[in-house]
Amino acid sequence: MVMTEVLDKLKALQDILAQKNSVEDSIQNAPKLLSTQEELLSRLKKGYIEKNEQYESVRAHIADLKIQLLDAEAAREKSEKAMDTITTQREYEALDKEIRDAGEREQQIRKDLQKEEHAFQELDENLKHEESLITQQEEELTERKTALAADIDSMTAELDSLTKAEEEVSPGINPETKFKLERIIKSKQGVGIVAIHGNVCTGCHMILPAQFANEVRSGDKIVYCPYCSRILYYVENPGIENEYFNEEDAGSLSDLDDFIEEEDDEDDGEDEEESDDKMDYDE
Ligand SMILES: [Zn+2]
């Protein structure tokens, strides 16, 4: 196979592999999108359980206070009744003290009860609020999980079709070259094959030894940049210059504008390596 054909295949493979990597990353990271919400939900549930325990203990305390209150009331009433049957001053004083003590106890219990009932009500409202919050969060999470599962399905389908495309383009590429390209693409953000401009690698912008640049130009074999390990290829007539001269040949009045625009565009030199950009210029 001619080297330019191999290089074209490698460029096509690069696009496919870069897309595959990005889809694989998205699939892998998808569950992380829910982790914040899952954490929030589990915090809410933990808080709810703790508050519910508090609620139960306040409720038990209230029931206990109510019994104590009944006891105190009964003690007071019993002493009050006994008042009718006493005969001596000493008996009166003893009973009077019993009644006052029971009354004080009653009052204290009523106070405690009021405080506890207030706390109970607050807890009850709190719990109801948190319950609805938990329900809402659970519903949202279920919805998002469903949506995410659908996303993952479609990403998996995309991955399958990319794998098919990879299988179609791979024949004719040396497996070792393919393996190297895969690794470069993973470590170099999806760009594993780049043009040289003059003696400069457009991937890492390092000036290459003349011998390397010559090897790239001769196009006899695959050459890797000694600095960034990317596969290098040579473009004889960079697209922009072609475009410019063609337009001048056509001799239209817009040539001057185009010329100025292109002169001002500092990125021109970098764009030549991208076949997409060339297509844009052709339009
Ligand atoms: Zn390089």
Image: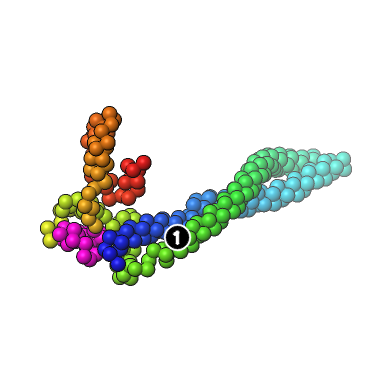
First to last magenta residue range: 212-232
Residue at point 56% right, 56% down? 149
Rendered view: 218 above or below 84: below
Residue 102 visible:
yes
Q: Amino acid at mark 1?
A: Leu
- Find residue 131 and report its horizontal and vertical position in percent: 64, 47
In this orientation, which residue lies closer to the viewer: 229 or 76? Answer: 229
In this orientation, which residue lies closer to the viewer: 187 or 91? Answer: 187
Q: Label 1: which residue?
A: 162
Q: Does 232 sit left or right of 29 as displayed?
A: left
Residue at point 41% right, 56% down? 19
**Is the residue marked by circle 1 packed among few (<14), some (14-19), or many (20+) residues within 10 Å?**
some
- Colour pattern of the rendering: rainbow
Residue 91 visible:
no
Rendered view: 219 above or below 136: below
Q: Secondary structure at mark 1?
A: helix
In this orientation, which residue lies closer to the viewer: 227 or 46? Answer: 227
Q: Does 97 sit left or right of 168 as displayed?
A: right
- Extreme-top residue of the structure: 253
Does the segment drawn in magenta span residue 213?
yes
Does the segment drawn in magenta span residue 18?
no
